[in-house]
Amino acid sequence: MSQTTPTTDKLATARETIQAFGKHYDYDVTYLEEFMSASPGAFQAFEPVMPMGRYRKAAPLELIFLVKLAAGRVEDCGPCLLLGVKMAREAGVSEEIIRGGLQGGKGLTPELKDVHDYARAVAVNSSAVTELLPKLEQRWGREVVAELALAIVAVATYPTLKRALGHAKSCSLIPELTA
């Protein structure tokens, strides 16, 4: 009878969770499975970062998804962006917000357009952040802005990991999207 170690059990559970996620969202998780197989230790070091994209306490749900979509466009990973759209819809985010996130802020209120533009400016390292950040902090508060910043970082994590692991092909350019 073979024995499993707690590490082996934890990895098996993580693999099952990742596979279920991929199946639920029709999202290719091969890069994560290969990452886990290639270096279980590296995967375990990465694993605590995975939930950061779901963190939200003070920020309105719509703002979180708006920054994820706006920053996701910059990452230019079609499958990751499509995943963001699916998740936004599942969370009940309005189609207006989703379209605005996908279409450069088009159709958004001025306040939401500022949020979109902030996320994009952060993602491309634009100096526009210095103009937009105080506006967002005044309107939404520092706690909300901190949560938006975390969401922007989370969005960049997966396309970066995919490309770093040689999955640039699966991180294909964004197709023409319609909401």
Image (spheres, grey):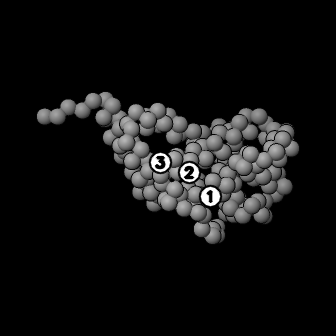
Residue 130 visible, this angle: yes
Q: Quadrant of residue 83?
A: bottom right
Quadrant location, the C terminus: bottom right
Q: CA distance from mark 1 to mark 3?
A: 16 Å
Q: Earlier in the sequence, mark 3 or mark 2?
A: 2
Q: In this view of the protein, which residue sits in the foreground, 114 or 57?
A: 114
Looking at the picture, how far across and down is residue 49, in whole percent? 53, 36
Amino acid carrying mark 1 in the image = Asp
Camera-side mark, 3 or 2: 3
> Circles 1 and 2: CB distance less than 8 Å?
yes
Residue 86 visible, this angle: no
Looking at the picture, how far across and down is residue 110, in whole percent? 84, 55
- Count residues near mark 2 (Cα–Cα under 10 Å), then give few for <14, some for 14-19, many for 20+: many
Q: CA distance from mark 1 to mark 2?
A: 8 Å
Q: Which mark is residue 165?
A: 3
Amino acid carrying mark 3 in the image = Leu
Q: Earlier in the sequence, mark 1 or mark 3?
A: 1
Q: In this figure, which residue is indicated by the disc labeled 1?
A: 76
Looking at the picture, how far across and down is residue 168, in whole percent? 52, 56
Classify residue 160 as left or right of residue 13.
Answer: right
Q: Residue at x 51, y 47 (%)?
A: 164
> Circles 3 and 2: CB distance less than 8 Å?
no
Q: In this figure, which residue is indicated by the disc labeled 2?
A: 159
Q: CA distance from mark 3 to mark 2?
A: 10 Å
Q: Quadrant of residue 140?
A: top right
Amino acid carrying mark 2 in the image = Pro
Element class at badge 3: loop
Quadrant location, the N terminus: top left
